[in-house]
Structures are given as structure tokens and as C-alpha cells.
Image (cartoon, helix red, strand yellow):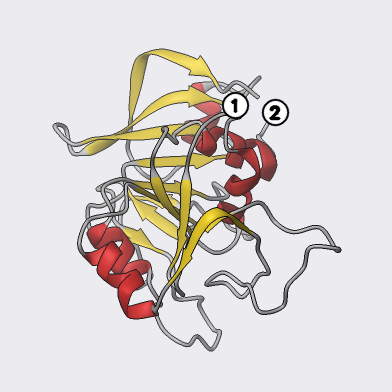
Amino acid sequence: MPLTREQITKRAAKELKDGYIVNLGIGMPTMVANYIPAGMDVWLQSENGLLGIGPFPTDAEVDADLINAGKQTVTARKGAAYFSSSDSFAMIRGGHIDMCILGAMQVSEQGDIANWMVPGKLVKGMGGAMDLVAGVKRVVVTMEHNAKDGSAKLVKKCSLPLTGKNCVDMVISEVGVFEFDKAKGRFVLTEVAPGMTVDEVKAKTEAAFDVAASVKTVAV
């Protein structure tokens, strides 16, 4: 059966490594903060100037002045640092962030991403995603596999304005895990959701992709 949003973000959290500095995008990716493996030292960074984001606060812990880039209230772990937005983007553009986990509206089979323009809605701009996909060492996307109208989001070519080209390393959706093979220039399906078949995944996907010799089941 398809993975839930919680299961998608739990799977994404398994990509974290001890000592990583990680930026979490708005939406589903923020949930990854609650699933960092026990004993792992991961530093979460926010574009608005915070390194050391903790789990989401309880009602008693809420501080209206302590927010992430998506304007959600957060907590700060011991040792956290506050700084200007310009310093934050210097970290990103300087290649000092190990991984970012982002949402997406479309990802192409070449690893392009479109995640900032909502069709028919007023938007303020691209935000920090353009810098993240260009400056961060590894880009992981967590997203629903299909749009509300049933159309594919892992597509042959993005029809929405791009955030970045050839930059996505992994896509995790409710149907499984796709890893980008840079040598071949295409995604490889490496894990499927429990009870789903490769043919079912193909039926939901517009993009062409390879299938790993041994496809695993996502551990949930």
C-alpha cells in the first residue's frame, strides 16, 4: 500500500548521516526533524538564520519569535546559533550544507526540479530553493507521486518554471524510492512501497526510469 507522509519522511531521515548540516524545505520535509535517528548528531539549518533547529515545539514550548523559513514555530537545540540571512545564504552558496530535503511539484527524468510556482496562484518568488539546489551537496525530494488531478509529478520534462537543472539525487514518494544514476543520467527505482509492484509504479509515472536488479521494499 502507498506510504503515508510520515513514512515518506521517516524514509528520508534514513539518508541523514552523523555530523550532517541539513536544510529542510517547507511542507512535508519539515517533518524529517521529528525522525532523526536516536544518537545521530544532525544540525538543521534554516535560510532565515538559524543553525540547530530542534523538534517542533509542544504548546508549552512555543516561542512566536523563533520560526523557520516557512514561518513555523520551532525549537533550538543546545549549541544553536543565530545569524543574518546573508550569512545563511553564504553557507548555502559556499557549499557548506551537506543535504537539503525539498518538496516538489515536478521532477523530470533528467533530475530537473520545479518547486516554486503554483499554477494559477499568486506567489512571492522562488525563495531560497534556487540557491539550495545549486549549492548543497545532495538534494533529496519528498513529494506525492501524483498531483490532485492524477497527473504525474515525476515527468519526462517539467512544464512548470524550473528551480534547478540536473540537481536531484533522490526522490521519495508514496510509491517508493528513486535514486539518480549520474553515469546513466536517469533515475533508478531501488525501493517500492509494501505491497506495490514495479508495474504499478510505472503506471503512475510519466518519466522513464531504470529498475534496480534487486528492488527492495521500503522499511516502514
Quadrant of image for the N terminus: top right
Residue farthest along the front direction in this orientation: 79
The residue at the point 56 percent across, 23 percent down is: 218
Q: Nearer the viewer, residue 201 or 133?
A: 133
Q: Position of residue 134 (x, y in %)?
A: 23, 61
Rounded to the nearest angstrom, the CA distance separating label 2 from label 1 is 6 Å
Describe residue 184's horizontal placement relative to residue 138 as left or right: left
Picture quadrant of residue 189: top left
**Residue type at the position of mark 1:** Ala
Quadrant for the C terminus, please. top right
Q: Residue pushed farthest left? A: 183
- Say whether residue 163 is visible: no
N-terminal label among 2 and 1: 2
Residue contact between numbered discs 2 and 1, judged by CB atoms under 8 Å: yes
Amino acid type at circle 2 is: Met
Residue displayed at 40% across by 34% down: 178
> Which corner quadrant of the image does residue 70 belong to?
bottom right
Q: Is residue 137 left or right of residue 46?
A: left
Q: Above or below — where is 205 with respect to 218?
A: below
Residue 193: assigned label: 1
- Residue 109 x, y percent position in the rendering: 30, 46
Quarter of the rendering containing residue 193: top right
| x and y, in percent, of residue 156 in the image | 32, 50
Q: Is residue 199 above or below residue 164?
A: above
Toward the viewer: 190 or 201?
Answer: 190
Mark 1: few/some/many CA within 10 Å (<14, 14-19, 20+): many
Which residue is at the front of the view, 167 or 174?
Answer: 167
Give the x, y percent position of residue 170: 37, 40
- The residue lying furthest to the top in this view is 214
Circle on res. 1: 2
